[in-house]
Amino acid sequence: MENDPADSSRSPSPAATITPYPDGPYLVRGDFAVTDQEGNELRLERQTIALCRCGKSRMRPFCDGTHKLIGFQAPSAPEPWPDA
């Protein structure tokens, strides 16, 4: 039996979650893929990755910890939308 939706013995893949860390990267966990601008999938070695938010990482789009060295500041909570 292939892909039987009634088969409850298989647990579904967890949805991807993205967590912004205060003054740090976005942590991405779950079932996800990262692609370049041409749609080529980037090779990932982990199921949890940190994406650069400061723009200064030497391994973008991934975080290398540079945010700590440059004093990057950003909240983890959403900022209000600007008035249109």
Image (cartoon, helix red, strand yellow):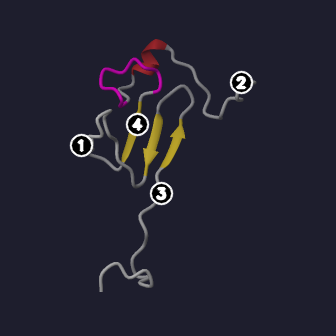
Q: Earlier in the sequence, mark 2 or mark 4?
A: 4
The residue type indicated by label 2 comes to: Pro
Q: Earlier in the sequence, mark 4 or mark 1?
A: 1
Packing grade of label 3 (10 A; few <14, some 14-19, many >=20) is few
Instruction: Confirm or deny contact between disc 1 and disc 2 (CB under 8 A).
Output: no
Q: Earlier in the sequence, mark 4 or mark 3?
A: 3
Residue 3 shown in magenta = no
Up-down: is 41 above or below 73? below
Residue under numbered circle 4: 50
The residue type indicated by label 3 comes to: Ala
The residue type indicated by label 1 comes to: Arg
The x and y percentages for residue 34 are 34, 42
Give the structural element (helix, strand or loop) at label 3.
loop
Quadrant for residue 56, please give it: top left
> Depth-wise, is mark 2 or mark 4 nearer the camera?
2
Inter-mark Cα distance, 1 to 2: 36 Å
Q: Residue at x 35, y 31 (%)?
A: 62
Instruction: Confirm or deny contact between disc 4 and disc 1 (CB under 8 A).
Output: no
Inter-mark Cα distance, 3 to 1: 19 Å
The x and y percentages for residue 51 are 41, 33
Up-down: is 46 above or below 12? above
> Depth-wise, is mark 4 or mark 3 nearer the camera?
3
Q: Residue at x 45, y 85 (%)?
A: 6
Secondary structure mostly taken by the magenta-highlighted segment of the chain: loop
Up-down: is 58 above or below 39? above
Give the structural element (helix, strand or loop) at label 2.
loop
Instruction: Confirm or deny contact between disc 4 and disc 3 (CB under 8 A).
Output: no
Give the structural element (helix, strand or loop) at label 1.
loop
The residue type indicated by label 4 comes to: Ala
Q: Which region shows up in magenta?
A: 53-62
Packing grade of label 1 (10 A; few <14, some 14-19, many >=20) is few
Residue 1 placement, left or right of 79:
left
